Image (spheres, rainbow, N blue to C red):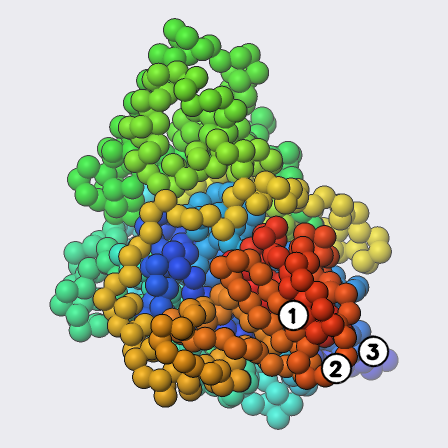
Amino acid sequence: MKRQLLFLTISFILLSGFAQQSTQKYLVGYGKTDITYLQPNLGFFGYGTYSHRLSECASPSEIESRLYSRTVNIMDPNTTKEALIVHVDLGGISDALRKGVIQKMRSVSPDFDQAAIIFSASHTHHAPSGFSEYPLYMASNAPGLQTSFLNFLVEQIFQSIIMAQNNRTESTIEMKEGRFSDNIPIAFNRSLKAYNRNPDKERSFHRNETNLAINREMPLMNFKDSQGNHKGFINWFGVHPIEIKPDTKKINGASKGYAATFAEENMPEGTIAIFAQSGAGDVMTSDMHNKETYTAQMSQIIGDSEYNPKLTSVPHSKWNGNQQALKALDIQKNHPTLLQISGNIDYELIYIDMPNVTVFSEFSNGDSQAKIGQPAMGLPALAGDDLCGRNQFEYDYNPEFSLTSGAVGFGYFLRWVVETFSQAPSSQEIAYRNEQEKAHSPKKRIVDHYSKKFLDMDIVTTRNPEDLHCLYKLFRELIINQDLILKQTFISGEQGALEEHTLVPTILPIQIIIIGNIAIAGIPGEITTIAHNRLKNTIQEVLAQRGIDKVLVTSYANEFIGYTTTYDEYLFQDYEGGHTIFGKHQLGAFQTEFKKLATEMLKPKGSRNLNYDLKPPLFSQYELSLRSNLTPLETQPCTTENRSVANDITSEKESLNKLIEQFSGVLQKIDSKEEMLAIEAMGQDIDFGTLNLNEIKNVLVKIDEIVTEELVLYPNPSSNRVTVANLKTKESLSEIRVCTILGQNVTNKIRILNKSNTKIEIDTKNLVSGIYIIECNGKNKKFTKE
């Protein structure tokens, strides 16, 4: 009897184990759309250099490689619940971008849950900026919010999502993993001294072992069709793709973009490869700690004797991307399955008020008074090269030995003089400085994003510049006006464009998506290697209780806030520590909030105690209008290469005809060159009846009409007028309605100048820049106002 019971027990255990490893079928779809965008003088996001922007021509020659939005849609057919993973070739994600796409999703599916979709970025430094409503980071050198670009991104990302939803097929999902060999120069720790301060590091690494002080593993989520054929994949490998430097003013997806392109060229048509980020905060694709030996090695690999890691190298970027692609394809095809993904889909996304998080004692590093500060940026993040010419990622770099440090010292001396002999700070100001010191020390705070001060000098001031203290005027002239990003920011402050909220986000999204027995956690901004490992372990320890076998942390997700370092790295104040904007306990705050979120996800959905009401604040349309679509203080002139492209396009009438036909689908009549009217185009196809003034570039034509089923649009950009006409039928035009691309009715902001049965002329002067939809006679036509 005992033997029989033992046999039955063993059989039950074996059958149970088999059931857990059984292959579950999901419905998986893939979407990919082009998000490459050209606009004269549009700045890039990444290096914080004002001159890093497209030229006044913004010609196709300024596209080195194209940018894409990639989406994977995973649906559980048993529950119809779906998870969407969206990855874009951008420097980061903004709340405005995320919110815009969610609104588009709810226009077709009103009950769409924003927690079901995670947005992440490759962090290329050569994608356009200007798609955040917050005035710092993505808007500082664009300059301002670039509404046409934001609307374009929203539409293109939305289309990649719809594409993925529409082509779902039965699939299985598995987790695999590989590791880069130590001798492949793929990635390096760029802040080794700070890394070595961590007590939980694997070991202390020597200066010449920067290649080992990173996570060299590449976990990969692989998708197979019903016949067992490999389809798309998502992998996670953290590294800054910064082979393309600010000395180049061209759009480029950098190594992560090249990796995806190389991989997709070797995959079945209609599938995609996502090269997601993880612990990239202190990792880069070149070894600046050992610059001489690394330079010699890479020069030989790419066959370029002139290679310099401080300058742009497209061959290096392609080589690095190719290595990541080869590793991912090798893992997909040749490595064993570690986990067969099976189980339900679950997700949560909440917002946290970061400055008011109470850090759990287990994450406070023994500090019973652990305090999260209001956001502020420190000296190491802004210092630039030191006086010996070393950049911030070289081993012996010292931010204190830099021109910026000297300027900071001069600024604080002037502040001391003013406050001692003229304008003493208030007791509230002193109390605030003390609180910030507790949270941020030993960081030397330069920019306070909450009080909006630069070296405690007001960025936002209602005082007439003539009323400012003479020493402040001197400081403005000698320091502020020498940096165009600072100058642009101070000008915006004086114009009342920075009055509302903070300069950077403080209400931050955290997210966990569970797909069967794996979890994907989305953290805003950049996170260093050890900080990433600690956060992952924190979440894993909790979710293991509900059968989660692996946690994957996706960085640059849902919003951008700079860096997150460990407490020990922060105290060292390397570049990443100086750019950890909420102070030394920022990682502890994230660990606290992710642990709370993961713990709630152990409960059934209806029993979770989560605050869904907290949301980021809204800026008024008035303030946004004051800092939207600004003209740069300094522009990049057209190069000879730019001009030659423009001349090539307009040199031959026959080739011009073909180009117009490609864009509009309607061959336009062309008279003499003197009568030609310049229109802009970005390289996307234009539907019948759609005139997007940002979508055609360097095409010189005369527009007679753009004919559709019934409606015609006659744009007149120079006079802010658009004429809607009805040429194909005798049906009278009804009243028109004008909406934003997000559905907001703005008809009250237009003025009807002339109206007849077949034509209506409207004045669009009071519309802010953006994409608009004209509704008339049951038809919708789009136009863009710059």
**Which mark is drawn over residue 730?**
2
Q: Amino acid at mark 3?
A: Leu
Foreground pick, 62 / 420: 62
Specify the label residue 75 is tagged with.
none
Q: Which residue is mark 3?
A: 5
Q: Report how far apart the C-alphas of labels 3 and 1 lie in the structure.
A: 83 Å
**Is the residue marked by circle 2 packed among few (<14), some (14-19), or many (20+) residues within 10 Å?**
few
| For marks 3 and 1 on the same chain, the one whose residue lies earlier in the sequence | 3
Quadrant of image for the N terminus:
bottom right
Q: Counting residues from the N terminus, which is met first, the one under dot 2 or under dot 3?
A: 3
Q: Residues within 10 Å of mark 3 (few under 14, many from 20)?
A: few
Marked residue nearer the N-terminal end (2 or 1): 1
Instruction: List the single residue furthest toward the top.
Output: 421
From the viewer's side, name the closer residue of 260 and 336.
260
Disc 2 residue type (three-letter)? Lys
Q: Residue at the location (39% across, 48% down)?
A: 632
Disc 1 marks which residue? Answer: 724
* Picture residue at 65% right of the left edge, 39% below the top: 353
Does residue 744 lie above or below 162 as drawn?
A: above
Measure how far apart labels 2 and 1 are at the Cα level.
Answer: 14 Å
Question: Is 475 drawn above or below residue 545 in the view shown?
Answer: above
Secondary structure beneath label 1: strand
Real-space Cα separation, disc 2 to disc 3, in angstroms: 87 Å
Residue 630 placement, left or right of 56: right
Indicate which label's residue lies in the foreground, 3 or 1. Answer: 1
Q: Is residue 525 left or right of residue 18?
A: left
Q: Pointer 1: residues within 10 angstroms few (<14), some, or many (20+)?
A: many
